[in-house]
Image (tube, rainbow, N blue to C red):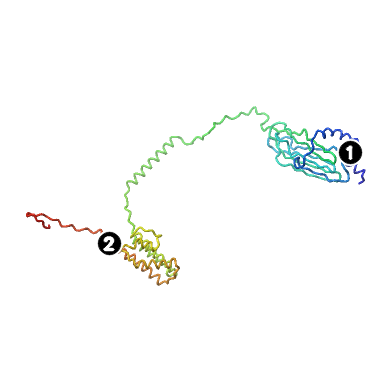
Amino acid sequence: MSRSVQAHCVAPSRLAVVAIAGMLAPVARAMPQAASPDRAGSAVTAPAGNARVAAPVAVPVAVQIAPDTVRIGQAFVVVVRLRVPQGATVVFPTGPDSGTAVEALDPRVVATTPDSSGMDLTATYRLAAWDLGRQAIGFAPITVHGVSDDVAVPLNDLTILVAPTTPADAAHRLPKAARPMFALPRPWWPPWAIAAAVLLGIVVLWLVAGWRRSRPRHATQPLDAFADATREFGALDRVGLLDAGEAGRFVTLSVDVTRTYLVRRLAPASMALTTVELMGVIGGDPRLPRARLYALLAENDRVRFARHATSAEDARALGVEARRIVEEVERRATAASAETTAPTPPRPSRVTGQHGRGHAA
């Protein structure tokens, strides 16, 4: 394209340039210097070409608002389109002025479409209004930085109509009566039903209490440590641990039965005591075969804690020894109890005779 044709496409005629410059000169003098793009908004620069902008030119701007009537809080879109010559930089406002009834919901979106003679720019704003009636959309001017001077493109007379949500004719609509501050639900059951239920519950409790007082009391059988030990030994034999190759477990379980019996029969000691501690608690009892019990407990400690391998014959012999110790202690304890509870023969009384000497009756 020749230089004359390119100049004709980029700039208007000389007369139009003079007229536009005369109209924009007061505005340019009244406006302050343009701020940096970081504070004023986004800056878009048109691609530089062979032609230069020698004087301020008119920037055509088109604004579209969709929809033109909204409800309170309903989003609407404002689209601003303008075309700038080559070498120009455009700074769009970030959004409506603060403090107004219209505010931005999302950041603005700027799209550019460059061509050989200039660039088309489109800025899209998503807004919402928060007051009824015709509301003004207060945008700051668009700043176009040219090659020589800056041009401020104002966005005036932008409004949005906010319609009310009430119907047009509300004369026939009657408001509801005011509700109480604390509306408590009314129970569906009458008070007499509550009183009858309470009375019935009291009668039932009284009858149950009388039945529990009148029923015969069954005397609780005292715990028999020897019977429990005998039952545990029989259950251990039925399990068949020796046949399954669990000789060590058979020994430990047999000794546990013996320990439990001794604790329950002789002294209230704990099952958590060690062999030395247990012998220190019950070792002084004369009913206890001390040497045999100590040997049995020592062998059990070797099997349980030292992982000593024992044969099935040795394990069976230890189980028999544990049962014999229990039986022997039970015989001695039963004999000692019988001697303690045996009646004491009455002592002979002395009767005084006629001559003052006493003789046995």
Question: Residue 13: x and y, percent?
Answer: 90, 37
Answer left or right for 273 relative to 124: left
Circle 2: is it few (<14), some (14-19), or many (20+) Cα within 10 Å?
A: few
Q: Residue 140 appears at what percent x and percent y?
A: 76, 36
Label 1 sits on residue? 12
- 281 relative to 196, above or below: below
Helix, strand or loop under label 2 = helix
The residue nearer to you, when weighing 257 against 296, is: 296
| Kind of residue at disc 2 | Ala
Q: Which amino acid lies under the numbered mark 1 shown in the image of this protein?
A: Pro
Outermost residue toward the left in this view? 355
Residue farthest toward the front in the current orientation of the protein: 33
Q: In the image, is residue 135 above or below residue 43?
A: above
**Residue at left offset 44%, top offset 37%:** 194
Residue matched to label 2: 336
72 sits left or right of 115 in the view? left
Q: In x, y percent, where is residue 63?
A: 78, 37
Using the numbered discs, state the Cα–Cα distance from disc 1 to disc 2 in whole angstroms.
135 Å
Q: Quadrant of residue 234?
A: bottom left
For image coordinates 85% across by 34% down, the residue present is: 25
